[in-house]
Amino acid sequence: MKQDLLLFGALIVIVAMIFLLVPKPIVFSTTVSYLIIGLILLALIFIFIRTINGHFVGRRIVFLFVGIAVVLPFFMKIHQPIRVSPEVQTVYDSTAQLKPGSKVLVSFDYDPASAPELQPMAESYFRLCLEHDLKIIIMGLWPQGPQQAELALQIALADSSIVKKKLERGIDYVDLGFQTGNEFVIQRMGTDFRTMFPRDTRGIPYDSIPLLRDVRNFSNIDYSFNLSAGYPGTVEWIQVAVDRYGLKLGAGNTGVQATGMYPYLRAGQLKGLLGGLSGAAEFERATGKEGTATFYMLPQSFSHVIVIAFILIGNAAFFLGEKNKARKEQK
Amino acid sequence: MDTFGIWVAAFLTLGIISFLYRDNPWYKVCESIFVGISAGYWFVTLFYDNILGLFWRGVTSPDPHYMLLVGAVLGFMMLLRLVPPIGWISRWPLAFVVGATAGLYIINYFSSNVMLQVQSTLAPLFSTKFGQPIFEASLYDTIGNLVIAGGTFTGLVYFFFSKEHKGVFGGAARIGIWTIMITFGASFGYTVMSRMSLLIGRMEFIFGDWLRLIR
């Protein structure tokens, strides 16, 4: 307990010093950035040699390195090339090729915990839709999904090219909010949206919303985009809305889920996929407007290098341990 | 108010991250706040969206939906589990839920995850589609088709336990397990990316929104 309090006090002192003494913002020059990368690599080589010599690293050292790898790139100025993959391009093309006035259903099936991966996708996607004069219908199968949608929508609406259009809620976009019931909600929407969403988030009845006047079920939706972090999510949308009602669906998924979505992509059940943060960065690249995801890619790459390095070090330690054990047994 | 919110969020974020050092009272406080707020949030959301929004407004509207009463009765019966002498009544709505969910799942999974996936696996090796000229597909597609055909076949061989994994059969099973391992590896890679993304998001909040060190 005493040690905990001491550490807590030390943290407060560090934070106070940062607020008072450190100039803001910090930006490393390219030379300093490469120097830091060199020092990290040297430290990793040092750890590797120590491990081979039988001095294993503690887990807190690994955490420290991951922390450094994630934080320092925020201050670096290094350009990282991003290539748009076909599945990301498909989402872009499917949306950009829609005629102005087409209706796009965007389902927010995630909560703030997955926001770092999915929020950049949502912002870029809304921006793309609004730039192409598409009508957006927002909903969520997760309680906090529509709130995330509102955050993304505000950012997209604040874009200079979109502010000029003077878009109106209820005419150009509508937020139907959250509805509980998982895939049963999708099932009911297949026959009538109104039964699941009698009002929008402002309490306006479904029939009084101009945008929804001609929207009865999925047959009135031109394209749908699902942002998913688990259950209910993309799998349920595919199983019910796509395979039963013929909805055209693209998806943005967390990295954890992404590999599971590729079979659906290959089978044509999904029309495009953004997988994790890299998918979000690729989509930003496709839309031509770099945003949060692109900014996050450098820390992402650094952290991957650190993880790979520690996997190699861990394996070296393991095989070395096995070798030492065999030697001792021989003696 | 925004500044206060950012400071509270920073306090909670650091509290949760402090678990990396070791379990401590700060972490416990943050964890308890998270659990409590989540439970409260869910309760309020479900009350306003379901009980008030769907059920109450549905039943009391000028065009009432009396079918909703059936759901309400089943929901009430579920709560009777809290009364031990008549707790057995809660099994009926549970049976309804299990039956309906199982029925829906069987159809959904069989159609989307079995039939359509089998269909997409049955692709020609050297063409883009059945009926198209042979060797019309690009090298990229051809290699992809070969990997899928070989991977699926050998993966299935690995799970065939009625014959000893020896000789050619054993070799195919070995390729199968390698295919499965590569799949797990890809999944693990994506998972690492996902978890790192969350950490990056939080670090950007700490060093950007809170400490204002990032441009």
Image (spheres, coloured by chain):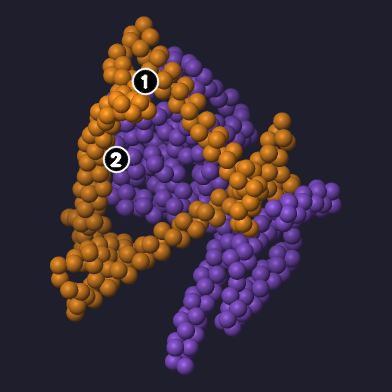
Task: Identify the subunit bearing mark 2.
Answer: A
Please name the color used to draw chain B: orange
The image quarter containing residue A179 is: top left
Circle 2: residue type: Gln
Task: Give the alpha-carbon distance from disc 2 to disc 1, as whole Å.
Answer: 21 Å
Q: Tell me which corner region of the image, top left, top right, bottom left or bottom right, holds residue A92.
A: top left
Seen as rendered, the residue at the extreme front is B85
Residue B79: x and y in percent read 36, 26
Chain A pictured colour: purple
> Residue B140: which quarter of the image?
bottom left
Is label 2 on the same chain as label 1? yes
**Quick check: B107 left or right of A309?**
left
Which of the two labelled residues, at mark 2 and mark 1, occupies the earlier sequence position?
Answer: 1
Q: In this view, does A85 lie above or below B210?
A: below
- Left or right of A183 on screen, residue A228: right
**Amino acid tagged 1:** Arg
The residue wearing badge 2 is A239
Q: Where is residue B30 in the image (x, y as percent from the top left)?
A: 61, 43
Q: Is mark 1 on a helix, strand or loop?
A: helix
Q: What is the chain letter for disc 1?
A: A
Q: Where is residue B116 in the image (x, y as percent from the top left)?
A: 23, 48
Q: Residue at x 48, y 88 (%)?
A: A328
Residue with the mark numbered 1: A194
Q: Can residue A148 be seen in this view?
A: no
Q: How crowded is the residue under tag 1: few (<14 C-alpha within 10 Å), some, or many (20+)?
A: some
